[in-house]
Image (cartoon, helix red, strand yellow):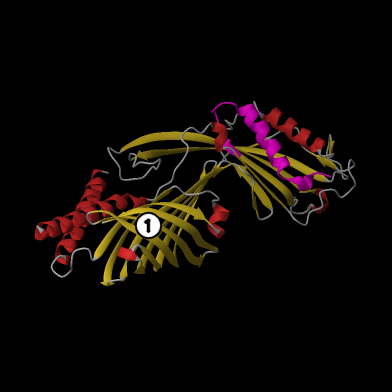
Amino acid sequence: MNTERTCLGHARKAAIWGVLIAGLLPAVAGCYPYDSNKSSADYDIAMTQFDSKANFFPVAPPNTTYFMPNNVEHIVPPGTTDTIPTSYDSLILSQVAANMAARQYQRDATIQPSSNFIVSIYVTTSTYYGYAYWGGWWGYGCYCYGGYYPYMDPYSFTTGTIFITMADQSQVDNVAQTAPMIWGCAINGLMYSGQTSSRITDQINQCFNQSPYLGP
Amino acid sequence: MRMLGSNFLRSIVATVAVFGIGMTADRATAEEGDHWAILSYQISFPEGDTHDFIDATSFRGIGIEGRWFVRPNLSIGADLHWNVFFKSTNNTTDVPNGSITGQQDRTLNVFPLLATAHYYFGPNKMFYAGVGAGAYYLSQRLDIGLYTFSDTSWHFGFAPEIGISREVGYHTRAVLALQYNYAFKVENADIDYWTVKIGVAY
């Protein structure tokens, strides 16, 4: 009886060890939970950077001025046709102007020697192609590789980025025709995925809201 | 892909076979009950740099542990965990001279690989205290917007632990333990968290 129980005990332990080790092997790939119900807006990001030495109000508000061209520059590779839609350009321009006005910057209709800042807006797009590898689910909300009935799924998506820059005209290099950027904002997200106008509006507002130094 | 899957299955079979043989060989030299195999579910609470990155309790944790008794009240062993910390946030994050706002999915996969020693006291090894030391493998990932930033690193660390165990059946014990994990700083971040283990020992 004791011998039987001893053998049973060791056999159980061997089996248990095997199961335990095998159960942990998928861990080698790591576990990266994610929310599969994200909307397009959840992929939008707003990044801002600024020159910590910059003086954003060289004259007391509301007398600080800036010049912003009435067009949005589309950045496309040399030799290619500009296919970036222009339908949102006026929205972008008006939203930036509204945020600048809310912070007591006055816009000059044409560039003046007295214009303190030059604000420029650029838009670019990128299209990505690839294959998604689907390997199956390994439980408790983890997507791990090495699963069941894997297959490849082709995909493509286009992203759009809006750059808003503010340069200090008092530091213009007339020879190189450049001016140092003292504030910049980059907005990035999925294109052609709906609610574009509201997403652009929200993200431009977010860029200004997370830059409190732009306020008087 | 089929080759990968096949190799994966072969790895499982080979690992099971190796451990099976190891346990069978062990029978010739050891008395019954002189080693424990522990499977535990783990809940972890981040501290320090770990908390700075993810301030959320982890309910994704599993561990296996082997303990071999070299004295009636003293065991040495090996401890392998897998603790996953995750938090999704859309807070604005400050970066040098700037800020970034967007949906962020922050994930830490921590794999401690520890050599352990435990001392037992009380009736029928009811209480124990011990410490583990060894390598911590950290896989860190930040998904923000359409971008992913990831990094991996190895750390040296240690893990003191106190616990209580009680026999609940033939060669079976229930185990409840509290472990503190700390791994030293590499690339400006350490690993720091408490873990509650709820397990079964055979």
Image location of residue B118, percent across then percent down: 36, 68
Question: Residue B177's quadrant in the figure?
Answer: bottom left
Residue situated furthest front in the rendering? B123
Q: Is residue A189 magenta?
A: yes
B154 and B52: which is toward the camera: B52
What residue sits right under mark 1 in the picture? B81
Tell me which residue sits at (58%, 37%) in the image: A44
Q: Nearer the viewer, residue A74 or A119?
A: A119
**Is residue B172 positioned above or below B147 on the image?**
below
Residue A51 position within the rendered picture, expressed as x and y whole percent measured from the top left: 73, 54
- Image quadrant holding the C terminus of chain A, namely top right
Expressed as whole percent of the image width and height from the top left, the position of residue B115 reads 35, 68
Q: Is residue A117 visible?
A: yes
Relative placement, left or right, of B102 versus A156 is right
Q: Residues within 10 Å of mark 1 (few under 14, many from 20)?
A: many
Tell me the residue at 43%/46% (across/down): A32
Image quadrant where one finds the N terminus of chain A? bottom left
Magenta span includes A171: no
Question: Is A180 situated above or below B71?
Answer: above
Type of amino acid at the residue the image marks with label 1: His
Looking at the picture, tell me which residue is in the foreground, A87 or B189.
B189
Chain letter of the residue carrying label 1: B
SS category of the residue bearing label 1: strand
In the visual, does A78 lie left or right of B78? Answer: right
Where are the magenta residues, as a range? A188-216
Answer above or below: position of A137 versus B65.
above
